[in-house]
Amino acid sequence: MTRTTPPRPRDVEALFPELAAYRDTTTRLHPRPGNPDVSASSVGGPMLWPADEPWPVCTEAHSRGRGRRPADIHREREVLACAWAREPLSGPTEEERQLLNELCREHQIPGVSDTEPLPLIGLAQLYQRDVPDLPAGPDGCDLLQVFWCPFHAHGPSRYDLLLHLRWRRSAEVGEVLASPPQPKVVGSKGYLPEPCVLHPEQVVTYPFAGLLPEDLSTRIDAWEEALEEEAEQQEDEDADEPIGYQYDLSIPPGWRVGGFASWHTTDPSPMDCLTCATPMELLLTIDSSEWDGGSESWKPLEEGDLPAHRFATPTKVIVGRAGELNVFACPADPEHPHRWSIQ
């Protein structure tokens, strides 16, 4: 099913003609629950992975023997989905609540060392043919595969994530790995995606306001403040929230490829390649939700009557405190190490 972004509530280039020089595109992936196969772009679906190639693993030293079992997490989500569909007001029955309590238990896996190879979770795979804004990979690669470790225990702080990206030429994959290894337990259920098919849609996007020239950014701020003052003077409790550049006119929410990163949680940070110092470009945004109360203007037309509860989090992936992960790539050489920021 197609997913269509509604027209923007205002023509931002008519308001600020200078923005035309910064116009770009981003591809909203619109992941929704489904049953993708290895030939499809997907989130949480099976990977086109060669049977004779080792599955990526985490070897960094950290605790990995205690957490929740993946099968329990999938079952918990299934029980909750059925309960809310059946009784949207009351939710799970008492019997279901007891089952959910059991499914939410953490388990200890005996004999697991802190350096034992830990299978990474296949998070997403994107075929270039499906995603207009996916850049060319190295040496003719047309498939990007994204993995991560299911424990936030990396880096100097020991609270960072570990992300692994792999480019490949899909036509060269022969026999596909039928049963990839998976971790026995995960540190957080937000690392475990539900299988989703994608409905890519290319839309226009503009930079985060804080990265625009100061004069233009100041004028945008003044315009937003005037709209807020006008809304306050109306004193209408049923009136819609005034539109804003950040949440309605520039950067869409949800999983997407290309375009501009949002810096709504931290100040903008330079993302230069650590190998060649080239300014990096946004490759992929992994978002905890497809829309929320502040970004409902981006909700697809086909889903205009759906509430955020139950429908805005199809992948079940949670980044940080329900934020988004922006992954950056070097445009000079896609094989250079990626960088990322959590917002």
Image (cartoon, grey):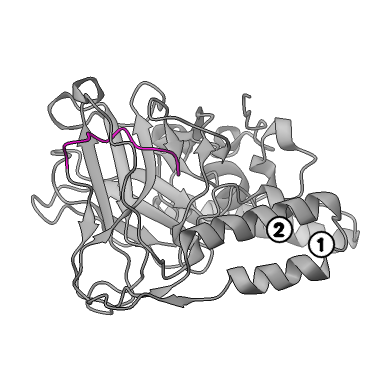
- Badge 2: how crowded within 10 Å, few (<14), some, or many (20+)? some
Residue situated in front as seen by the camera: 17 or 188: 188
Q: Quadrant of residue 148?
A: bottom left
Q: Residue 137 in the image: state x and y as whole percent.
A: 21, 31
Residue situated in front as seen by the camera: 275 or 56: 56
- Check whether the beta carbons of the residues at disc 2 and disc 1 lie within 8 A of each other: yes
Whether residue 111 sits left or right of residue 247 in the image: it is: left
Separation (CA) of disc 2 from disc 1 = 8 Å
Residue behind mark 1: 91
- Residue range in magenta is 44-53
Q: Is residue 47 magenta?
A: yes
Q: Residue 155 in the image: state x and y as whole percent.
A: 23, 73
Q: Residue furthest left?
A: 276
**Disc 1 secondary structure class:** loop
Q: Amino acid at mark 2?
A: Leu
Q: Quadrant of residue 304?
A: top right
Whether residue 225 sits left or right of residue 139 in the image: it is: right
Q: Quadrant of residue 128?
A: top left
**In the image, is residue 109 above or below residue 7?**
below
Q: Amino acid at mark 1?
A: Gly
Q: Quadrant of the C terminus?
A: bottom left
Residue behind mark 2: 80
- Residue at 65% x, 53% y is 78
Residue situated in front as seen by the camera: 276 or 173: 173
- Residue at 20% x, 63% y is 117
Whether residue 273 sits left or right of residue 256 in the image: it is: left
**In the image, is residue 82 above or below residue 101?**
above
**Disc 2 secondary structure class:** helix
Whether residue 324 sits left or right of residue 306 in the image: it is: left
